[in-house]
Every structure is written in C-alpha cells, then in structure tokens.
Image (tube, rainbow, N blue to C red):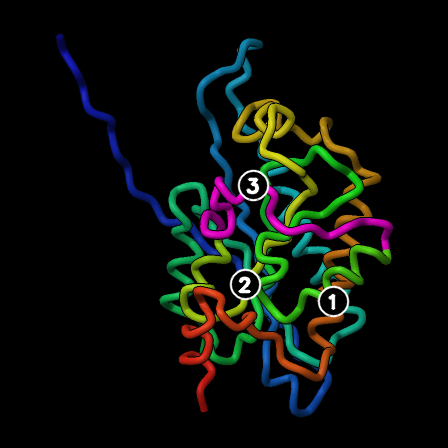
Amino acid sequence: IKIEGANTSYFKSQNVVGYLEGTDPILKDEYIMYSAHYDHVGIGLADEKGDSIYNGARDNAIGTVTVLSMAENLAKHPTKRSALFVLFTAEEKGLLGSKYYADNPLLPLKDVVYCFNSDGAGYNDTSKITIFGLNRTTATRQILNAAKAYNLEAIDDPASEQNLFDRSDNVSFAKKGIPAPTFSLGFTAFDDEIGKYYHRPADEPASVDYDYLYNFFRAYVYAGRLIADKAERPFWTEGDKYYEAGVELYKE
C-alpha cells in the first residue's frame, strides 16, 4: 500500500479592522467590538450534484453582513461608547484570526468592554434568534428587548452538547476576560435542517430567507446600540467560568 502525505502550503491572510469614536466624553474610552469571521471552507468534497464550492452563506456571510450593518448604522448615528469592527480570517482553520488579534490587539484589551460576535451554522426557526451565551453576561435584557422589537425571540443555546460558545471567535476574547456572546440564527436543535447546509455546498445565498434576515440584522444593530449606550458597563454573570478572567482584565 502506498500512502502519500498532504502537501502543505503557507500564506498570509488578514483580519479587517475598523474603528468609530463614540459621542460621550467619558464612555468613548470604552469600546464595543462587533465581530465575525469572513472565511469559509472554500473548495471541498463535491455533493451528489457535483458541486464542490462551499459558498458559506449562513457560515459566515450572514455574520459578516451583520457587522457591516452595524458599521453602516453607527457611521450615521454613533453611540456613546466607541465601536471596533473586526472581521476575522481563518476561523475555519482553528480560530486563527481571532486568536492572533487577541494576542496582538490594536487597542488594549481592557478598553474593550464587550465583544458582540456573529456566527452561525444555519436556522430552523425564523421566529427566533439564538445567542450563545445569552444569560452569561449582564446584557441579556438589551438583547431580549432588541429581538422583541422586531417580533423575534432571543433564546440561549439549545444544543449545549455542541459546545458552540467555545467554537467561534468569541471564545478567543472570553478567555481574555471580555464578555463575548455570539449572535446566531434561530434554531431549536442541531437537526437535519441545520446539517443540510452546515459546511455543505448547499449553503448558497439563494437558499436563505431574506425577510427573516432583515429583522435578524436589525435586531443585532438595535441590541448593539442598547449595550453601547447603557450607562452600566456590561460584564460576565457572576459564577461564569470566564468571570474571574474578566475581574483580572478590568481591575484598576
């Protein structure tokens, strides 16, 4: 039996970062990070139709548009806190882009008081938004209210066995102590409807519900605005496994 190893090639890829100053003379020194990864699988195994292009509409073009929607809104109507927009590379290769930024930040991490990440595998319930870590920070109420404003229900992770909180870029910052939930498409179980598109060539733009996405984007923007304008700084819920890291990061 002859076995040949895979050929490995190395190349450079970039994170994309933007910044917008807040309006409050004091709170503008605190930043809300709006983040998502822009990479996907690329070309892989072909499906039964012979399609080998993994477009990544749900994972994670939607997340990328979520952040761009926030940037577009804040450019017109800045919030009290400043905004940091970061689109990460190489999430699909092991969170490489976010890990690099967390270790080499352009701004001190202690100045970033919240990371509002957006990533997703898909959806099976267009009445909901799923938040990985919804109840793990003190910004729960702002997210619930923002979802409700657009006739959506924000729910916590229904598939804890998948450990999704720790599988996206948000965890690179949670480990540093920054409160960092992930805003994701609505699903009630990691079922066949999710599997039909998750890391599959079928995850194409023509397959998504744009009426649902419109409200999804608006809910994210509104939630971000509520968090960024709230007088009280968001933090971890006491007892969370990253709570002590947050205490250490933000200590005076």
Can you tell which quarter of the image residue 203 is in?
A: top right
Q: Position of residue 97 (x, y in %)?
A: 42, 54
Query: Residues in magenta?
Result: 150-168
Spot occupied by residue 173 in the image (x, y as percentages of width and height):
46, 64
Instruction: Check contact, mark 1 vs mark 3: CB within 8 A.
Output: no
Q: SS for tag 1? A: helix
Residue 214 appears left or right of 172: right
Q: Residue at x 83, y 56 (%)?
A: 148
* Residue with the mark numbered 1: 142
Query: Is 224 positioned to the left or the right of 178 in the image?
Result: right
Q: Quadrant of the N terminus?
A: top left
State how far apart marks 1 and 3 are (Cα): 23 Å
Marks 2/3: CA–CA distance: 18 Å
Locate residue 162, reporting x and y percent: 49, 40
Which residue ends up furthest to the left in the rendered image? Answer: 1
Label drawn at residue 159: 3
Q: Is residue 6 above or below residue 94?
A: above
Q: Residues within 10 Å of mark 3 (few under 14, many from 20)?
A: some
